[in-house]
Amino acid sequence: MRQVIAANWKMHGDFSWAAKPAALEALLDTETVNKVDLVICPPLHLLAAMEAMVEDAPVTFGAQNCHAESSGAYTGEVSAQMVAETGAAYVILGHSERRDYNGETDAQVNAKAIAAHKAGLISIICVGESFEMRESGRADEIVAAQLAGSLPDCVTGLNTVVAYEPIWAIGTGKVPSLDDIAQMHAGIRARLTERFGPDT
């Protein structure tokens, strides 16, 4: 199984940043390139430009969001098919900032994932708990509920990546221990295996 390292640029970068991924090739050894899928998720306006500039660089691109509908009167939104047309292969869904600032629900993330898969995109579905949730001992319960609600039945090992976001560690100075991460990953894997089978 190949590892995925995805960089979410959030709302950072001007057009000059489109040249940055090409510099990665000089920094990577063959062993890393053969074992790891490197994904950069820049602001939407850079996607097509980056695809055109990287040529053979060992990097893939993704969007930071997509809409569940294929088209319609949704000002400011972008469909999964539109993302795919930029040449992107991935899309981040259910990021903690989208859930928090935009009120995205598990059901909305689920619908977006279905749209992403129909468009041939790999969805990076984010799950994670806040500090209050962790302190109350509900971290496992919260993440389990997000997994159950956010992942559609069409999930496979080829069209979905589950990304654990310990929200309580983002910008707080708090760092999850290796045990914290290992326990959460084990719980996530157990639930995915139970629902989708050990092969997936």
Image (spheres, helix red, strand yellow):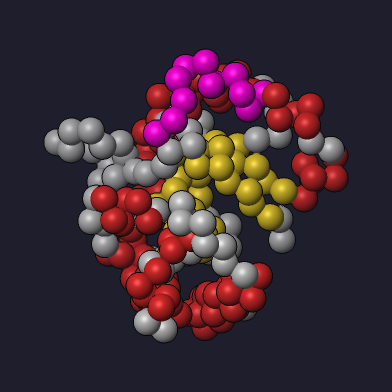
Secondary structure mostly seen in magenta is helix
Question: Between 156 and 97, which is closer to the camera in this rendering?
Answer: 97
Give the residue furthest to the left. 73
- Looking at the rendered image, the quarter that the N terminus falls into is bottom right
Q: Quadrant of residue 52?
A: top right
What segment is highlighted magenta in the picture?
11-22
Can residue 85 be seen here? The reply is no
- The residue sitting at 67% across, 46% down in the picture is 37
Q: Is 199 included in the stretch rendered in magenta? A: no
Q: Quadrant of residue 106?
A: bottom left
- The residue sitting at 43% across, 38% down in the picture is 10
- Is 172 placed above or below 53 here? below
- The residue sitting at 53% across, 21% down in the picture is 17
Q: Quadrant of residue 70?
A: top left
- Is 119 placed above or below 78 here? below
**Where residue 97 sits: x, y (%)?**
35, 51
- Looking at the rendered image, the quarter that the C terminus falls into is bottom right
**Where residue 74 sits: x, y (%)?**
18, 38
Give the residue furthest to the top. 16
Q: Is 13 included in the stretch rendered in magenta? A: yes
Question: Between 49 and 118, which is closer to the camera in this rendering?
Answer: 49
**Where residue 66 sits: x, y (%)?**
34, 43
Question: Between 55 and 12, which is closer to the camera in this rendering?
Answer: 12
Can residue 92 be seen here? The reply is yes
Specify whether 46 is left or right of 181: left
- The residue sitting at 30% across, 36% down in the picture is 78
- The number of numbered discs placed on residues in the rendered structure image is 0
**Where residue 173 sits: x, y (%)?**
51, 56
- Is 118 placed above or below 19 here? below
Specify whether 52 is left or right of 3: left
Specify whether 27 is left or right of 158: right
